[in-house]
Image (cartoon, rainbow, N blue to C red):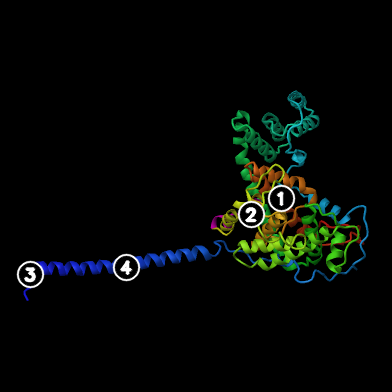
Amino acid sequence: MIKTKNTYVTYEMNILLIVISVLLSVICVLLALLQHYYFIIKLYKKPSIKYDIPVFEDLIPSGKTKFDRDFPLQAVKDYDEDLVLYDLNSVLNSQPQLGQSDSLDFIKIDKATGTDSEVYNTLQAAITFKLSGKNHKALKLFEHAAAIAPENPDVLNKYGEFLEQQHQDVVSADELYFKALTYSPDHKAALINRERTAQVVESLDYNLFKSIDAKNDYLKKRMKLDSFEAVKKQAYYLHIYHTVGIEGNTMTVEQLRYLLETGQVVSGKSLVEHNEILGLEKAMQYIKLLVRQDYIGINEILGIHRRVMGHVDPIASGVFRNENVFVSSHSPPFYEEVPSLMDSYVEWLNSEEAQSMHPVRYAALAHYKLVDIHPFIDGNGRTSRLIMNLILLKAGYPPVMVLKEQREKYYDTLKTANMGDVRPFVRFVAQCTLQILNMYIYGTRFLSIEGESQEGKQLVNYE
């Protein structure tokens, strides 16, 4: 047979097509492998930050809640005053906190009740007293004006100027300027003021985090040298006391300790109050198990909530809500959106972006984002605070507590975050972190959970 030129061309083209097909197949296989590899890496990627050894995880005792004590457990009595709480607050509040001012505690985020003329006259009177040097009277009038007209941008701006100029409280002033711009984005005076204070506040917040890190490093060194058993005993019960207390539980520290250690009911207290305390203790034990786990997923969040609410509402515990809810002035997302929002939340929670933040900022944002979604019918606040403390423990910081007396400030900063400024809430969590660090650093002596110390009933003694 004679092979023509065309036959050779056809043969070569067939070879070329085969080679090209093989190459394309190899490329497709490589792309599939790369895609699979990328998916696996993205799904199971370890956190980009290296967590410190969680040295404070033993602040949550394991097993049955019972400590070895040098004082007996007494029968529960009714006290006119909770001496333990009183002494703790006096210590925590005595510590100066960078950028914190109590002057905003009175402001309510309710609808304004005053008339325009009353607001105008009050504001003018406040400015007059300010110009005449009567700052105390001016402050009272600014407070009154802000209370009756919390959405008036002129009142908020002028009040902010007063705090900045007369009290050098740039942080609170900046918050007021932001609120003024929330209600009136083109308010010229507030825009000018906010442009000036924003950078100053950012610098103060940076210094606040530096102060937290310095105290935390010092506490870690102290933990290796000194015994903190007495403080740990107090802190564990106080943490439960304040966490449920914010939600309205009326048990005293002595009563909840009696319940947890004896298993006996406390006379005069509701079954729900008993179950809230038992559930929170189980949730704290679960948090301790999660401290050394890298990934925080949906199952872990549901597990926390299941323990928090399991004794109170077994049916609704550990499952997302199936109805819409309303929280004061905030309307959380529709319940149909909750599953997808929680998937996005978990993705953010384990992302490099989130874990590269300062741990206190990361923990505060994790708290806010979850409570903003409000994925459960009840127990959202307790679950959010537990996740916040889980993040802090994983990063080598002690768990923080929000005192019952800080409830108004706590909710006020959450409302401000809902308005678009999350910085006050992050700052509030940072100040709570300083509080607990101060408690551990300065307090080791004369502690009694009953408030019956032989040394003057003093909770924390400063060196």
Marks 2 and 4, the one that precedes in the sequence: 4
Residue type marked 4: Ser
Marks 3 and 2, the one that precedes in the sequence: 3
Query: Which residue position holds label 3?
Result: 4
- Which residue is at a point 29% across and 67% down the rendered structure image? 23
Pointer 1 local density, CA inside 10 Å: few below 14, some 14–19, many at least 20? many
Marks 3 and 1, the one that precedes in the sequence: 3
Marks 4 and 1, the one that precedes in the sequence: 4
Residue 68 image position (x, y, % from top left): 84, 71
Query: Which residue position holds label 4?
Result: 25
Marks 1 and 2, the one that precedes in the sequence: 2
Can residue 308 be seen here? The reply is yes
- Which residue is at a point 12% across and 69% down the rendered structure image? 8
The residues bearing labels 3 and 2 have C-alpha atoms spaced at a distance of: 76 Å
Residue type marked 2: Ala
- SS at badge 1: helix
Query: Which residue position holds label 1?
Result: 431
Mark 2 vs mark 4, foreground winner is 4
The residues bearing labels 4 and 1 have C-alpha atoms spaced at a distance of: 60 Å
Mark 4 vs mark 1, foreground winner is 4
- Which residue is at a point 65% across and 44% down the rendered structure image? 418
Pointer 3 local density, CA inside 10 Å: few below 14, some 14–19, many at least 20? few
Residue 403 image position (x, y, % from top left): 78, 52
Query: Which residue position holds label 2?
Result: 366
Residue type marked 1: Gln
Mark 3 vs mark 4, foreground winner is 3
- Quadrant in the rendering for residue 181: top right
- Quadrant in the rendering for residue 121: top right
Seen as rendered, the residue at the extreme bottom is 1
- SS at badge 3: loop
Mark 3 vs mark 1, foreground winner is 3
CB within 8 Å, label 3 to label 2: no
